[in-house]
Amino acid sequence: MSTSPLVIAIDGPSGSGKSSTSRGVANRLGAAHLDTGSMYRAVACRVAHLGIDPKTNPSDAIEVARTCRLDIDTSADHDLVVIDGDDVTEEIRYPETSAKVSAVATIQPVRDALTARMRQIAANCGRIVMEGRDITTVVCPDAQVRVLLVADPAVRIARRQAELGEKVDMEQVIDSIVRRDRDDSTVSTFEQPAEGVTLIDSTRLNLEQVIDAVIGLVPQSLR
Ligand SMILES: Nc1ncnc2c1ncn2[C@@H]1O[C@H](COP(=O)(O)OP(=O)(O)O)[C@@H](O)[C@H]1O
Ligand SMILES: Nc1ccn([C@H]2C[C@H](O)[C@@H](COP(=O)(O)OP(=O)(O)O)O2)c(=O)n1
C-alpha cells in the first residue's frame, strides 16, 4: 500500500452515502477519514449548550467556531468528537442536532474558521478521505480525487429511515434531507459537480460498488 500523500474529497447531499463510502475507501487505502459535517454538528451543539441563538446572535456563534477546542478522531473505524472537553460523539447525531446545524453552517465566518481547521487536519494526516459539502470546491480543490456523490431524494430518505429504525419520525427525516439540502445549498454547491469533479450516482449501486468506483479514480501509484 502506498504511503504517498493523498487527499480524496467527497461531497454530496445528506444520505447520499458519503460517510459509509469515505470510511470504506479510507480503510482500503490506509488513509485517515474526516467527516467535516461532524465539525459543524459539534459547533452547533456547543452553541446550543451556551444558550446562543445563531440566527439572532451570529457573532457569538462565530466566536465559538473560532475559539473552541475541537478534538476529532480521524481513524477510519472509530468515532470521537470532543468540543471544549465535552464528548458530543452521540449528541451530534441526534435528529435535534441535524435540525439545528444548518443555522450555524450557513454563517460564512463560521465556515471560514472551520475550513482553516479542516485544512490543518488534512496537512497533519498526509493520506486522508474528507467528506462534506464543499471539500471538492473550497476546502481542498486541489485534491487528487474529487467526487460528488448523489442519489435520488426518495432513496436517501429511505436509507435514513432504515438507519434510524423504529424510532423514526418521518417528518424529522424528511426535514433532515429536503429542508436541510435546501438551506445548505445556499452556501455550498453540491448538486452539480464543479469542473474536474466526478459525479457518482449511488441510487442503484450498493456500498461496495460505490467504494470500488471511488478507488478506481485513485492513480495506481497512490493506492
Ligand atoms: N450505496 C448504498 N446503498 C445502500 N445503502 C447505502 C449506500 N450508501 C450508504 N448507505 C446507507 O445509507 C445510510 C446513509 O449513509 P451515510 O453514509 O450516513 O450518508 P451521508 O454521510 O451522505 O449522510 C446509511 O445507513 C448507509 O449504511
Ligand atoms: N463541508 C461541510 C460539511 C457539512 N456541512 C453542513 C451541512 C449539513 O447540514 C451539516 C452536517 O453535515 P453532515 O455531513 O453530518 O450531514 P449528513 O450526514 O450528510 O446528513 O453540516 C457544510 O455546510 N459543509
Image (cartoon, rainbow, N blue to C red):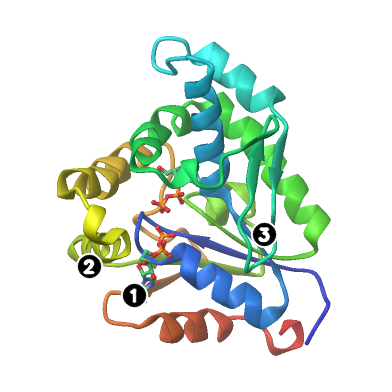
Residue at the disc numbered 2? 155
* Quadrant for the C terminus in the image: bottom right
Residue at the disc numbered 1? 202
Distance of mark 3 from mark 2, alpha carbons? 31 Å
Residue at the disc numbered 3? 142
Q: Give the residue at the far front of this rendering.
A: 166
The residue shown at (27%, 50%) is: 177
Q: Is residue 110 above or below residue 34?
A: above
Image spot of residue 70 (x, y percent) = 69, 37
The residue shown at (21%, 65%) is: 158
In this rendered view, identify the residue nearer to me: 162 or 102.
162
Q: Choose top left, top right, bottom left or bottom right for residue 156.
A: bottom left
Query: Is disc 1 in contact with disc 2, using a CB cutoff of under 8 Å?
Result: yes
Distance of mark 1 from mark 2, alpha carbons? 9 Å
**N-terminal label among 3 and 2:** 3
Q: Quick check: 64 left or right of 2?
A: left
The residue shown at (52%, 28%) is: 108
Query: Nearer the observer, disc 3 or disc 2?
Result: 2
Query: Nearer the observer, disc 3 or disc 1?
Result: 1
Q: Secondary structure at mark 3?
A: loop
